[in-house]
Image (cartoon, helix red, strand yellow):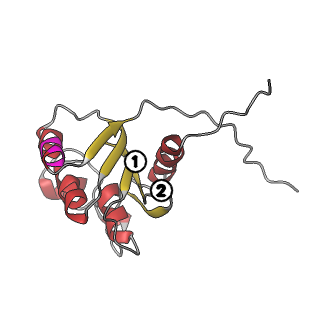
Amino acid sequence: MENKRKILTWDEYFISMAHLSGMRSKDPNTQVGAVIVDEKNRIVSIGYNGMPRGCYDDQFPWEREGGFLDTKYAFVVHAELNAILNSSRPVEGCTIYVSLFPCNECAKAIIQSGIKAIIYESDKYADTESVMASKKMLLNAGVALKQLDFTVSVDVDVTKNG
């Protein structure tokens, strides 16, 4: 019997891409990525958490504590919303892969855009009111939720040849 090479499942592939996208985030504490995929496993859009287009990262706060206008929370666009807004086509019927379970504001955008499923990895804020509200809305709207238990280890040679 022939040994077959282990390949990534679609879920592993797309959650890995969400992690890669999150690496673009300049947030010093939380890097979140999102990938929207259609029913044929084609990527429709990608996003990560960051400042709105045209707003310079170094002119806004990245703090987590302090007055509302002194923190990132007043300004950052989350990965899910960025992926929805950056899509060049409607995302209705698609699945979104996200490295961190969506907050209530992103849940609203996911529901309104017609995304049918969320596949996520971390649910570290499950006990917060924001995530509890998010789950209540998503389940009520019939959006499927699936948590992945996933870790990928990849050896990559990043040295240049020649």
Quarter of the figure with residue 68: bottom left
x then y, percent, for residue 108: 17, 57
Look at the image and tell me in which quarter the C terminus lies.
bottom right
x then y, percent, for residue 60: 29, 62
Disc ID at residue 24? 2
Provide the residue designation for mark 1.
Answer: 31
Res. 101 visible in picture: no
Relative height, residue 94 to residue 88 (above, below): above
Q: Amino acid at mark 1?
A: Gln
Residue 83 lies left or right of residue 17; in this view the side is left
x then y, percent, for residue 105: 18, 55
Q: Is residue 138 magenta?
A: yes
Quarter of the figure with residue 25: bottom left
Q: Is residue 31 magenta?
A: no
Q: What residue appears at the point 49 percent right and 58 percent down from the top-left corner?
A: 40
Q: What residue appears at the point 24 percent right and 49 percent down from the top-left corner?
A: 143
Look at the image and tell me in which quarter the N terminus lies.
top right
Judge by depth and name the residue closer to the eye, 42 or 52: 42
Q: Pick out the residue farthest to the right.
A: 162
Judge by depth and name the residue closer to the eye, 119 or 17: 119
Q: What residue appears at the point 22 percent right and 61 percent down from the top-left corner?
A: 109
Magenta residues (range): 135-139
